[in-house]
Image (spheres, rainbow, N blue to C red):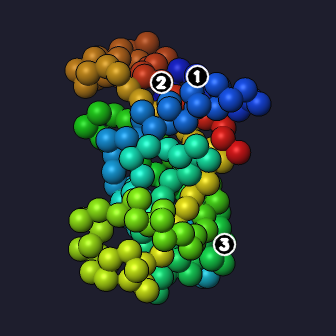
Amino acid sequence: MTQHDRSTTRTADPAHDTHDREQLWDLIKDMRFAMFTTRHESGHLRSRPMTTQNSKVDEDTSLWFFMSRAGEPVADLTADPLVNVVYADPGEDSYVSVSGTAAVVEDLSKKQQLWSKLSEAWFPGGVTDPDLALVQVKIDHAAYWDVDESQLVQLFKMAKSVVTGKPPTMGKHGEIHMG
């Protein structure tokens, strides 16, 4: 799928930084589940579904996740903190790929702030559960693809491209640099 490029580049302007955070959050706010990718000790990339815990992108441009301290994702990101988090909403033709640096953060007040009853299903011991790891992903870069046209219009554009030999242009593609 070919899209129009619309890039946003990070500047030292705080208003611009706020706009970037808001733009990114607007894209992912309704996609609570993401595929969280780490590099395993074998060298292979491994993705697992995770739930984003924060309800907005923090001032420091972070995404937050709860994970099992004993699980492979925590071991993986401890060995190699570079991660990728992918959000997808095929029904809305909206896709976001976030690259960043992950770390386990020991912050009880942040755990309490992010805690929900749904988290208790995975961590019955609550915010003080010794297996509960709070993982922060500091966002460096995000890319998005967002198609506004209906599927019927998309099909028409693809059929037209077959006839004309020119790739269709559908929706928006852009990049947001945070780090």
Q: Amino acid at mark 1?
A: Arg
Residue sitting at 53 percent across and 20 percent down?
Answer: 4
Read off the residue under disc 2: 172
Q: Quadrant of residue 84?
A: bottom right
Instruction: Answer with mark 3 or mark 1, whichever residue precedes in sequence.
Output: 1
Q: Amino acid at mark 2?
A: Lys
In which quadrant will I find the N terminus? top left
Q: x, y (%) of residue 158?
A: 35, 22
Read off the residue under disc 1: 6
Q: Secondary structure at mark 3?
A: loop
Q: x, y (%) of residue 136?
A: 55, 62
Question: In the image, is 177 to the left or to the right of 132?
Answer: right
Question: In the image, is 149 to the left or to the right of 56?
Answer: left
Read off the residue under disc 3: 80
Q: Which mark is residue 166?
A: none
Within-10-Å neighbours for mark 1: few <14, some 14–19, many 20+ = few
Within-10-Å neighbours for mark 3: few <14, some 14–19, many 20+ = some
Q: Secondary structure at mark 1?
A: loop
Q: CA distance from mark 2 to mark 1?
A: 7 Å
Q: Are marks 2 and 1 in contact (CB under 8 Å)?
A: yes
Q: CA distance from mark 3 to mark 2?
A: 32 Å
